[in-house]
Amino acid sequence: MLEPLKQQNETQIIIKKKRDTLNTESVLSGGGKGLTRFLPFLGPAFIAAVAYLDPGNFATNITAGSRYGYLLLWVIVFSNLMAVLIQALSAKLGIATGKNLPEVSREQLPKKVSLFLWVQSELVIIATDLAEFIGAALGLYLLFDIPMLMAALITAVGSFAILELQRRGVRTFEAGISAMILIVALAFAFQVILAKPDIGAMAAGMVTPKFQGVDSVLLAAGILGATVMPHAIYLHSSLTQRRIVGRNHREKKRIYKMELFDIVFAMVIAGAVNLAMVVISAALFFKNGLDVEDLEVAFHQFGQLVGPFSAMLFGLSLLVAGLASASVGTMAGDVVMQGFIKKRINLYVRRAITTIPPLVIIWSGIDATKALIMSQVILSFGIAFALIPLILFTNNKKIMGELANRSVTKVLAWIIAGIVVSLNLFLIVDMLI
């Protein structure tokens, strides 16, 4: 009984792959009209965009909105614009070389450097996974009043279920992750409506760069640290390296243009959700003189200030974002191991191993929000080791061919790298002191 069903599923996957190939061939040869020509290329950026919606963002954005109102909205806008360029460079590397960033690093850098990059990237991904796992468990705890340890075990089962989507093909996994992003986006859209923000103050905050004391600078650095994620840089290049392969420069250039649409679309949604977090926090908490740093406190305040439905939406978005980003973090871990040291372990084994640290932390009773914040500090260590090699490689014409960065892109990329690395160092020093 099971064997015929398995064969039927495999046949359907093969037919779908052939259909996608035909659609892609048509677009690459100049066919397709309107938005439909972008459809075969949509997906990779949505998986990478999950990194921009992880529970670490929830913690920093809620704090920023409750403490400074609409003041730091411009940081979200600026961070998102930077993310578009960074993810575009990562996608372009995969398209131009047919290799992901860790693979190119292994080929271009000394063996000891490559080994170091692998170790630090694994540590960064463990920290990322910690934030995502704890966030999802916290969402379950808040929604259903389940003890945190039990919620963590249920989260583990849920993360395995999402990984199962990969067995059904890349497009199925992309569709599943995209659906989860949509749930989070809709949840925050409803919350914005319920919060009734000041539209004028919101618009001004998005376009007026300013700070209000040293603490606001620290929070801006925290927002940036929670936005630009090292594992998203590694992962995006792997998502584009073999998905649609260009046979010549013209096709590669066209694929890249199509992927840019995917990137902008996905980043606009991710950016809108991050903006919504700050806006809701400003409209509810800042307006009522509440300085909210803890996600559990935020959940209960949503219930008191707006109603149970608002609290439920917040808990649901935290749960879904945590589960989605946890599965993507597991994928990223597989990419860096295979790329840097040519080794691979089963995704389910990796998932099982990476559930241990968050389970231990939850079992020990450490505050979940504090654990999320500390994970962001560890992430700050890793950003330079992903971003700088990415820029060096995409600037190199021997590696990239005709898709190498142009002069304007080079300048912008190095400026962004300087800002990102400086702010993350600033954040690390402050946290340690």
Image (tube, rainbow, N blue to C red):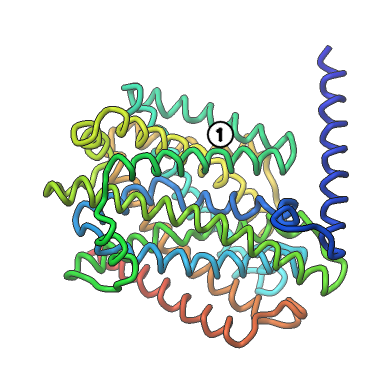
Q: Amino acid at mark 1?
A: Ala
Q: Is residue 340 above or below residue 313?
A: below
Q: Residues within 10 Å of mark 1 (few under 14, many from 20)?
A: some
Nearest to the observer: residue 408 or residue 124: 408
Q: How many numbered marks have been drawn onto this rendered protein structure?
A: 1
* Residue at left offset 19%, top offset 36%: 305
Nearest to the observer: residue 29 or residue 360: 29
Q: Is residue 147 left or right of residue 127?
A: left
Q: Is residue 151 left or right of residue 63?
A: right
* Residue at left offset 27%, top offset 43%: 195
Nearest to the observer: residue 117 or residue 94: 94
Provide residue 20's location: percent of width, then percent of height.
82, 47
Residue 432 can be seen, yes or no:
no
Q: Is residue 193 above or below residue 261?
A: above
Element marked by disc 1:
helix
Locate the N terminus and report the quarter of the image it occupies: top right
* Residue at left offset 33%, top offset 61%: 222
Residue 244 can be seen, yes or no:
yes
Q: Is residue 135 above or below residue 415?
A: above
Q: Which residue is mark 1?
A: 352
